[in-house]
Image (tube, grey):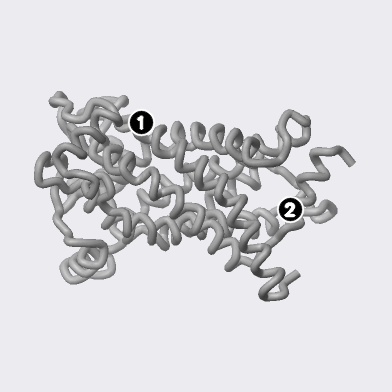
Amino acid sequence: MAKGEDKIQKSAAQKVSKFGSFTAGGLAACIAVTVTNPIEVVKIRMQLQGELMAANQRIYTNPFQAMGVVFRNEGIRGLQKGLVAAYIYQIALNGSRLGFYEPIRAVMNKTFYPDQESHKVQSVGINVFAGAASGIIGAVMGSPLFLVKTRLQSYSNAIKIGEQTHYTGVWNGLKTIYMTEGVKGLFRGIDAAILRTGAGSSVQLPIYNTAKNFLLRNDIMEDGPSLHLTASTISGLGVAVVMNPWDVILTRIYNQKGDLYKGPIDCLVKTVKIEGITALYKGFEAQVFRIGPHTILCLTFLEQTMKLVHAFESKVLGHN
């Protein structure tokens, strides 16, 4: 057996329960979002800047300048707006995405490759499907939190960008939406969320696993933090390119008060028609600076949280 394959097999042998995977994924994502939330705030405001305007003055010119503007006008609290909602959303989204990815992939591998050990099969098609499916599950579960998070982060007393909706906190936001629009209001834009998350999830873990396994099999890198960091960086860049257009659309649909957009396709058409195709990559620099570190931190910490959960389930709960 090749040295790299032996490492992969040992890593795959350290399995945890589905709840353990959910816990490890959610915990890793919360650690990551604490660091990247300020970039998420400015990304959302940059995506809303000049909404459906042929020409506009750019208040936020780049992520670092934007963070400076927010800090000067709103302080640290302004940069960490929506953090509680982001925590709950990350638990739902990434806990599901990272927790359901391997089980879905294993079922697909056993179905289409019954004569092979499922953890050894690396089919690009199956990996993409598993990533998209697990991401969509998370998007549906976390959609109301992302809706509130978007509105909390876009709101500013100092600089008003896009439609402004004021909530005192995440629970106030959920309650207000439910009281005025019902359950349907809480899931406004769910179709856009599915498209965005499905696009990002379909490439995140497949790129990460492909890069990681390639580096291991070819003895380019040893298993450890450096390998996880390298594979995570590659994965983050891929996700940013694929997901940004759908992220712009989702932000605008979630932030609207009325029915400016009938759905994601209507938003796409109106945005491109009035602002041009480049509008779909508004906030891309912030997207890279957010999703790169977020993916790196999330997937790197996932390796560690998985080990912690595995040790807990083995030693405390007595699971094999």
Is residue 173 visible to us here? yes
Query: What residue is shown at x 30% (from left), y 31% (from top)?
Result: 63
Quadrant, the C terminus:
bottom right
Residue 64 image-quadrant placement: top left
* Frontmost residue, 114 versus 242: 242
Q: Where does residue 125 sit, x and y in percent of width and height?
A: 64, 43
Q: Is residue 24 above or below residue 55?
A: below
Q: Is residue 233 above or below residue 202?
A: above
Looking at the rendered structure, the secondary structure element under dot 2 is helix
- What residue did someone put label 2 on? 12
C-alpha distance separating marks 1 and 2: 35 Å
Q: Which mark is residue 284?
A: 1
Q: Amino acid at mark 2?
A: Ala
* Frontmost residue, 22 versus 222: 222
Residue 318 image-quadrant placement: bottom right
Residue 169 image-quadrant placement: bottom left
Q: Which mark is residue 37?
A: none
